[in-house]
């Protein structure tokens, strides 16, 4: 592991220096006083692929604003440094972006551990930080911060949508598979609480260390336990390997699989037989809702060469977080952090604008976006290789609300949040 | 009896997994044993082999007219066999190119070789990203080895047992080559005393080139066999280097059977820890390393290797 970290650090360090110097050079010759945004998405490690998708979403929103003159008349520039799916790197990147590069805002996260690390640094300096795609309940619970806003549904939201129904429909003997880090722990904790509350018995919780590539032992163990339901909170590359191996064993149909959220970059291109079970998402490109076709067309125009031919939930969150930040700055009429935070806390987006089934709004107590959560499964009848999901249900923000977050989240006061005006 | 019945599937799984680990370590062992070089590009060559195989099995032949149509019409099994033969050969060429770059580092501090192979690993991984993209890919496997079978009330993957069997076959082939052919004898002699081999008129430069090519092609074979289980992404090789290194250290540097037995031991340790103390499953192989090295610094079957001379 040490060697892997060293490898990625050296590689990404070199890449980051190159990217930073190019951007710094371009910033120096730009007219006016550009607003510099720090993109803190992973480019290596477990969430490299999702990080790239996240970044594309941010860049599309930035491109939209720049094409109409920027925000408050300032062109938006970006700097990206790889956070390596590693919390320690996340801290270092945030510190560097704020103190050396003087970024105005920071956007991006897939790993909850990284998001937590970045947000601690952001809070110290008062820099507004948007956690676009990490979904541990702790991000808007005990690890919440005044400067941090969380855009994705969290593990508890998805569990609320799926778990109770699964206990009554499939049975009471459950096994949990838990990725051994903050998101996995908290998501499984939420699942356990909801399942046990609905009368289920957790026969065993199998811990999956990050970086696991061989799941054969765990899958044999599940067969020996013979549960009715397996609830898996396994993400990123680990999940891809796990899905492949479950599929090879034809275990996808033997048990009811409840997979928390299923990020689009994690499954895009996989055979649909690997997409067993029910899983959550916050958006799907095939929604028959206003604006979706135009959004897809814009994505395809901006990214004609990417292998992911249609946008997914990670891109969607990256886009909406960035767009909402820009709109909040415009509404505030300033980039001063307290004013922007107050605007974001009041954020409401009508369903028709956000391309979801319910209006979305920012919870001012937890700073988590309250939005529609969808349950999906594999679309086995589709002839279109992009059309992989079949949306089977959707739940309103009120139905899936993470009620405990309101009490566990203790936002710092404005007085305790340093003022910062980029 | 119940305990035995509970443990048996994990024992079988551990043995299968162990053969796969041994397969991963074969190419690494060959290069370390003969050339005294820790090849940090081993994992990237593993990944490159898988990507070459992927392109051979499922190529984009839009611009190749009738040849494209003819090739696409071949059965998946045939294309898979072609990939298993051709992709390692292509990676062998890349490996030989790397060995030519290495020559100026021979006789210098080990760090030069480490840095060069590390740099090569980065270049190969980024090249993969540029050519094939960074998204997850799935390598198709022939129907004959896909699916699953039931035994003792448990489901096992056909492919995993095919892969383990193939690993066993490769171990046998490499052993046959090293032990029963004059080329193998020369390679082994080169590992023990390269100067003496040179004095006997053997072209040491060519020998090193061939060994590096062979080691690289074995990495590629492991990549082709393992990626249908682990998945295919540009950094898949990162997951390979450390277990490979660990296995040859546990087995004893330069020892063929040491690497094989250490591979099986690692497989068993990972399988049992994964089943009964899953949070320790990643760490278990490192604990095995510590346990072995504490009591036997040269590893299980390590003789006084050329590295100690």
Image (spheres, coloured by chain):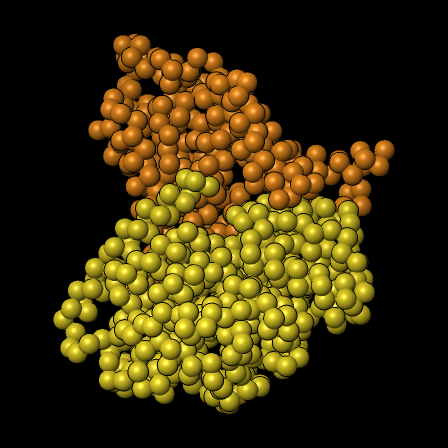
Chain colours: A yellow, B orange
- In this rendered view, identify the residue nearer to me: A75 or B69: A75
The answer to whether one can see residue A379 in this image is no
Q: Is residue B104 left or right of residue B250?
A: left
State which quadrant residue A297 falls in: bottom left
Q: Position of residue B104 (x, y in %)?
A: 21, 29
Residue name at image x 20 percent, y 64 percent? A24
Q: Position of residue B245 (x, y in %)?
A: 46, 31
Q: Relative to A381, is A287 above or below?
A: below
| Residue B35 versus residue B230 in the image, above or below | above
- Does residue A208 appear in the picture of this structure? yes
Report the side of A360 relative to A233 (left or right). Answer: left
Q: Quadrant of residue B203?
A: top left
Farthest front residue? A415
Residue A37, compared with residue B96, is above or below; it is below
- Residue that appears at 39% across and 56% down: A91
Q: Position of residue A308 (x, y in %)?
A: 44, 68
What residue is shown at x 53% (from left), y 73% (from top)? A366
- Residue furthest out toward the right: B1
| Left or right of B220, for residue B109 | left
**Residue at image location 52% in from the left, 48% down from the top:** A211
* Viewport quadrant of the C terminus of chain A: bottom left
* Above or below for B86 versus A322: above
Q: Is residue A126 left or right of residue B73?
A: left
State the image coordinates of residue B178 (x, y, percent, origin top left).
Answer: 46, 20
Name the image quarter holding residue B90: top left
Count up the numbered dots. Answer: 0
């Amino acid at each position: 592991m040490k060697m892997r970290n060293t490898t990625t650090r050296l590689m990404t360090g070199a890449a980051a220096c190159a990217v930073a110097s190019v951007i710094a050079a371009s910033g120096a010759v730009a007219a006016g006083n550009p607003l510099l945004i720090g993109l803190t998405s992973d480019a290596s490690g477990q969430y490299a692929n999702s990080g790239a998708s996240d970044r594309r979403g941010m860049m599309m929103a930035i491109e939209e604003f720049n094409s109409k003159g920027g925000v408050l008349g300032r062109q938006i520039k970006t700097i990206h440094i790889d956070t390596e799916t590693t919390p320690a790197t996340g801290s270092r990147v945030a510190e560097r972006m704020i103190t050396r590069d003087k970024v105005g805002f920071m956007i991006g996260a897939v790993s909850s551990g990284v998001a937590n690390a970045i947000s601690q640094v952001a809070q110290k300096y008062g820099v507004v930080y948007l956690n676009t795609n990490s979904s541990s309940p702790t991000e808007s619970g005990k690890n919440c911060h005044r400067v941090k806003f969380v855009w994705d549904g969290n593990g508890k939201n998805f569990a609320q949508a799926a778990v109770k129904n699964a206990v009554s429909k499939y049975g009471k003997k459950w096994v949990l598979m838990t990725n051994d880090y903050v998101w996995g722990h908290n998501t499984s904790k939420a699942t356990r609480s909801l399942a046990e509350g609905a009368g289920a018995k957790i026969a065993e919780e199998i811990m999956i260390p990050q970086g696991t590539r061989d799941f054969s032992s765990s899958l044999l163990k599940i067969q020996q336990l013979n549960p009715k339901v397996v609830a898996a909170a396994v993400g990123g590359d680990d999940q891809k390997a796990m899905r492949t191996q479950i599929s090879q064993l034809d275990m996808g149909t033997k048990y009811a699989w409840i997979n928390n959220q299923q990020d689009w970059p994690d499954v895009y291109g996989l055979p649909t037989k690997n997409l067993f079970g029910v899983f959550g998402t916050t958006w799907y490109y095939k929604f028959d809702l206003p604006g979706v076709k135009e959004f897809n067309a814009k994505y395809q125009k901006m990214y004609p060469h990417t292998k992911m031919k249609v946008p997914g939930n990670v891109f969607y969150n990256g886009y909406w977080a960035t767009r909402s930040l820009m709109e909040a700055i415009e509404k505030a009429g300033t980039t001063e952090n307290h004013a922007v935070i107050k605007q974001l806390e009041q954020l409401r987006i009508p369903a028709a604008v956000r391309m979801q089934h319910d209006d979305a709004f920012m919870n001012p107590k937890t700073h988590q976006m309250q939005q529609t959560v969808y349950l999906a499964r594999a679309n086995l009848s589709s002839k279109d290789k992009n059309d992989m999901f079949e949306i089977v249900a959707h739940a309103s923000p009120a139905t899936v609300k993470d009620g405990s977050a309101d009490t566990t989240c203790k936002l710092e006061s404005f007085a305790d949040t340093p003022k910062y005006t980029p | 009896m119940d305990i035995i019945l509970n443990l048996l599937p994990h024992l079988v799984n551990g043995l299968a997994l162990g053969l796969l680990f041994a397969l991963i370590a074969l190419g690494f062992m060959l290069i370390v044993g003969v050339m005294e070089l820790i090849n940090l590009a081993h994992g990237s060559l593993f990944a490159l082999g898988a990507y070459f195989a992927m392109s051979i099995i499922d190529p984009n032949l839009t611009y190749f007219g009738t040849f494209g149509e003819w090739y696409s019409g071949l059965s998946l099994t045939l294309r898979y066999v072609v990939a298993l033969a051709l992709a390692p050969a292509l990676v062998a060429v890349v490996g030989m190119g790397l060995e030519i770059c290495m020559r100026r580092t021979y006789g210098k501090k080990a760090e030069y070789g480490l840095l060069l192979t590390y740099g090569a690993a980065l270049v190969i991984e980024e090249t993969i990203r540029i050519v094939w993209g960074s998204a997850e890919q799935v390598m198709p496997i022939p129907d004959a080895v896909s699916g699953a079978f039931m035994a003792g009330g448990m489901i096992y993957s056909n492919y995993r047992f095919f892969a383990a069997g193939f690993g066993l076959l490769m171990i046998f082939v490499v052993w046959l080559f090293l032990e029963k052919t004059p080329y193998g004898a020369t390679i082994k002699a080169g590992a023990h005393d390269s100067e003496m081999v040179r004095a006997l008129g053997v072209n040491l430069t060519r020998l090193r080139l061939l060994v590096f090519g062979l080691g690289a092609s074995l990495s590629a074979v492991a990549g082709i066999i393992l990626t249908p289980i682990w998945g295919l992404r540009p950094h898949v090789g990162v997951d390979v280097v450390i277990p490979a290194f660990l296995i040859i250290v546990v087995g004893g540097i330069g020892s063929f059977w040491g690497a094989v037995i250490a591979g099986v031991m690692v497989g068993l340790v990972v399988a049992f820890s994964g089943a009964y103390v899953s949070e320790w499953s990643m760490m278990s192989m490192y604990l095995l390393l510590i346990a072995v090295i504490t009591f036997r610094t040269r590893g299980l079957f390590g003789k006084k290797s050329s590295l100690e001379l």
